[in-house]
Image (cartoon, rainbow, N blue to C red):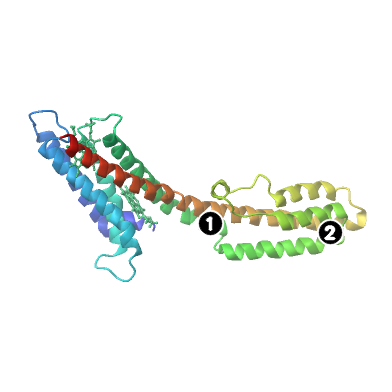
């Protein structure tokens, strides 16, 4: 997904959403209920039902996404409509509530809805932003190619370090054995490893290289340069993993929060009818 989802069909779904929001706003402004303008009026019910129907339809996207084969409607249509109609909910649901909030399950449903929407907006921005940064970071190569380059430089490091002292050799060995790319979600999102064995090796070997005997100095200089190159590749691979994680992490909020929203919404509707 990229920017085209937002401009899809010349903003058709943006126009639909603006129309839905405008109709809701005009109806809310024109409506003069006997009591307070809240969910308990006929307009309140209408906006509530529209909002709930929108939420059910937005959730259906999770199912639609997984149905393979050509459907009647293209996935791009679904996504573009999902994004814009999801945003229209802010207007329809807010007007439905009549801006009466409290510490109750009704407001919980509303807050969860807002959180789902915020995570969705983040997702769209991430899908627009990170793919380009990923390509720039990898310089057109794939992550697999980058990993292969790291392995190759690592092999060269081990070869060059063979003729140099044990202390340097041990650093190269540690860099080779203990360098981690990826790991836990936090590690991936951080895009760095504070205990990076390659960075430690690079810094230590740079210091040790100054004290090697004359006949090893050329190899030591070459090793420092190779470790610097490896460090740069490792950094790039970690950044790649970081971008990927940043593009995925929001779905860990969007989907569970959407499910929680559905549960709160059912409770809300049951509660209002129960107490009515
Ligand atoms: C089938 C759909 C819906 C129905 C029948 C419905 C019904 C109602 C009713 C009757 C009220 C007025 C309660 C009162 O004044 O005591 C109300 C208020 C409210 N509704 Fe809904 N609603 C629906 C959907 C939604 C949705 C989708 C949301 C947001 C996610 C929502 C959030 C709220 C909130 C925050 C209030 C204000 C509660 C308060 O007064 O403290 N409702 N709803
Ligand atoms: C209350 C409103 C919303 C609900 C209930 C909802 C629910 C969902 C669900 C269930 C999925 C399927 C995820 C999956 O199964 O992988 C989804 C996907 C998605 N949602 Fe929402 N959504 C809402 C609002 C929004 C908004 C406002 C935006 C953006 C502004 C948005 C952006 C997205 C995107 C980009 C995807 C596609 C993710 C992917 O395929 O990688 N959503 N949403």
- Determine the CA span between mark 1 and mark 2: 32 Å
Residue 158 is drawn in which quadrant?
bottom right
Would you identify the image quadrant in which residue 223 lies?
A: bottom right
Q: Position of residue 210 (x, y in %)?
A: 85, 48
x 26%, y 30%: residue: 101
Q: Is residue 101 above or below residue 250?
A: above
Q: How many marks?
A: 2
Mark 1 nearby-residue class (10 Å; few <14, some 14–19, many ≥20)? few
Res 6 quadrant in image: bottom left
- Residue closest to the far front: 274
The dot on residue 77 is none
Q: Position of residue 214 (x, y in %)?
A: 92, 54
The residue wearing badge 1 is 136
Residue 251 in the figure: left or right of residue 12: right
Most distant residue in the bottom direction? 69
Relative to 192, 60 lies left or right = left
Q: Quadrant of the N terminus?
A: bottom left
- Above or below 101: residue 46: below
- Residue 107 coordinates in the image, percent (x, y): 28, 34
Q: Is residue 114 above or below residue 34?
A: below
Q: Nearer the viewer, residue 126 or 59?
A: 59
| Residue, disc 2 | 219
């Amino acid at each position: 997904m990229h920017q085209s989802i937002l401009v899809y069909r010349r903003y058709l779904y943006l126009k639909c959403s603006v129309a839905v929001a405008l109709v809701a706003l005009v109806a809310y402004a024109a409506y003069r209920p006997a009591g307070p303008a809240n969910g308990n009026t006929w307009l309140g019910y209408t906006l509530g039902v529209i909002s709930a129907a929108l939420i059910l339809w937005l959730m259906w996207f999770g199912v639609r996404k997984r149905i393979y084969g050509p459907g009647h409607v293209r996935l791009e249509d679904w996504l573009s409509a999902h994004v814009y109609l999801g945003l229209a909910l802010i207007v329809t649901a807010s007007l439905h509530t009549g801006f009466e909030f409290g510490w109750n399950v009704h407001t919980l449903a509303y807050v969860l809805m807002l959180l789902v929407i915020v995570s969705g907006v983040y997702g769209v921005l991430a899908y627009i932003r990170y793919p380009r940064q990923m390509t720039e970071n990898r310089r057109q190569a794939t992550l697999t190619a980058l990993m292969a380059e790291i392995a190759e430089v690592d092999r060269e490091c081990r070869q060059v370090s063979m003729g140099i002292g044990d202390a340097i050799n041990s650093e190269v060995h540690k860099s080779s054995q203990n360098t981690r790319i990826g790991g836990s979600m936090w590690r991936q999102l951080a895009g760095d490893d504070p205990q990076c064995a390659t960075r430690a090796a690079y810094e230590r070997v740079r210091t040790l290289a100054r004290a090697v005997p004359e006949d090893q100095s050329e190899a030591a200089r070459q090793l420092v340069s190779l470790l610097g190159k490896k460090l740069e590749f490792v950094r790039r691979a970690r950044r790649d993993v970081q971008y990927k994680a940043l593009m995925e992490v929001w779905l860990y909020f969007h989907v569970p929060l959407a499910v929680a929203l559905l549960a709160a919404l059912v409770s809300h509707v049951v509660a209002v009818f129960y107490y009515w």
